[in-house]
Image (cartoon, helix red, strand yellow):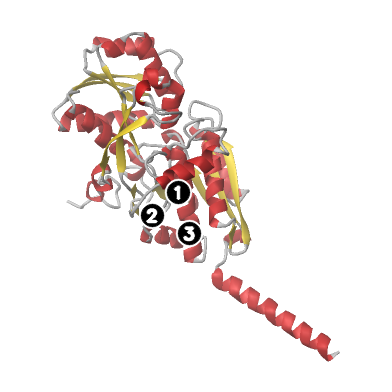
Amino acid sequence: MKRKLMTAIVSAALATCATVVQAQQGKLSDDALKIGVLTDMSGLYADFGGPGAVLAAKMAVEDFGGKMFGKNIEVLSADHQNKPDIAKNLTQQWYDRDKVDMTVENLNSGVALAVTGLAKEKNKIAIVTGAASSRLTNDSCAPGTTVHWVYDTISLANVVGKAVVKAGGDSWFFLTADYAFGHSLEKDTGDVVKANGGKVNGAVRHPLNATDFSSFLLQAQTSKAKVVGLANAGGDTVNSIKAAAEFGITKNQNLAALLMLITDVHALGLNTAQGLYLSEGWYWDMNDENRAFAKRFEARNNGKKPNMNQVGVYSATLHYLNAVKAAGTDDTAAVMKKMQDTPINDVFAKNGKLRPDGRMVHDMHLFLVKKPSESKGPWDYYKHMGTVKGEEAFQSLEKSQCPQFMKKS
């Protein structure tokens, strides 16, 4: 009897200690932690984000350990079909029904602007990786809930636009996707071109997921501009470059791919993509750490290397999880403070910094697409032409158009 009583007392004490330790570790609202990956699973941005973005988030959860304060971390995913209204409805359901704590990827600037607006209303963290519009941390900012992680139209303009002008491409005509992203990229790149002594001869806007670029490219050809700036992305960039080659435009005019990822180069092939300048925040073959991550990723992604957006999803998700752990809670304000206070040092960025306006500042790189004869094997596509420090690539906080950070006159 004494032995049984002692065993019961010890068991109760251990259970109490375990409860105390778990309480000290942290507490989750709704007793769960859920992450939603909102992306394009089947459209023109499916290779840009898509299943690869979902995989990246799951890899981050696995590398973190799979649990938060003893509870499983869940990853949900959905296809927004590049429609802001569908994206907003899906996110509303995630917040209200599924109790999702954070959304990531949010590819497509129209989608991102809709989702970040809802996240602000619901006081949830929305991390944007795939969308580029600089409005997300400027006039449409939502400090405290919106995070812009990988790139934006200002950084793309500062890296590619500036380099092309300095190389002699001082007259531009823009082929622009007709929605928030394209408009921002056209404006921001045009500002950089003019600031560096170039001029803009004009622009033409095409619908998202266009099937025929002939009339748009004819206008670009007629402009006599030295450079045709592609203010589009994903399938639209791939198809416009193919069409430009077929029409012979590249014999007399240069193309500037303002937002182009390695998955787009892979889709085009080096014969068509060679000689293009582009900007990325990450490339698989830059160092051993990147190569090791790419090897793990492609083994689970049908042999496809990750692009910077997908690695950005991994980085952002892992940073969020570490912030929740450090804060001891999934409370939005507490987690955001930890995210801002902690430098980002992972496979994507070194000494990255999340600013109060939601912009994650990190180095960007200028690449030149290799000739077929220069490539040593599959996915060996880039020559590294230079690195632009984050403080130079991204807009400074002093120039922010976010109302909370604009200087009072």
- Name the residue at 53% across, 37% down: 298
Residue 250 to residue 385: above or below? above
* Residue 211, visible in the rendered structure: yes
Are the residues flagged by discs 2 and 1 in contact, CB closer than 8 Å?
yes
- Name the residue at 54% across, 53% down: 63
Between residues 91 and 395, which one lies in front from this camera angle?
Answer: 395
Among numbered discs 2 and 1, the one appearing first in the sequence: 1
- Inspect the image, locate mark 1, and give the three-letter code of the amino acid beneath it: Ser
Are the residues flagged by discs 1 and 3 in contact, CB closer than 8 Å?
no
Q: Is 89 left, or right, of 273 in this rendering?
A: right
Residue 143 to residue 234: above or below? below
- Mark drawn on residue 322: 3
> Within the image, what quadrant is residue 341 found in?
bottom left
- Name the residue at 38% across, 27% down: 375
Between residues 372 and 219, which one lies in front from this camera angle?
Answer: 372
- State the image coordinates of residue 166 (x, y, percent, origin top left): 17, 29
- State the image coordinates of residue 240 (x, y, percent, origin top left): 39, 18
* Residue 191, visible in the rendered structure: no
Cα distance in 3D space between marks 1 and 3: 11 Å
- State the image coordinates of residue 86 (x, y, percent, origin top left): 54, 34
The residue at which mark 2 appears reads as 344
- Name the residue at 21% across, 12% down: 224
Among numbered discs 1 and 3, the one appearing first in the sequence: 1
Among numbered discs 2 and 3, the one appearing first in the sequence: 3
- Inspect the image, locate mark 2, and give the three-letter code of the amino acid beneath it: Ile
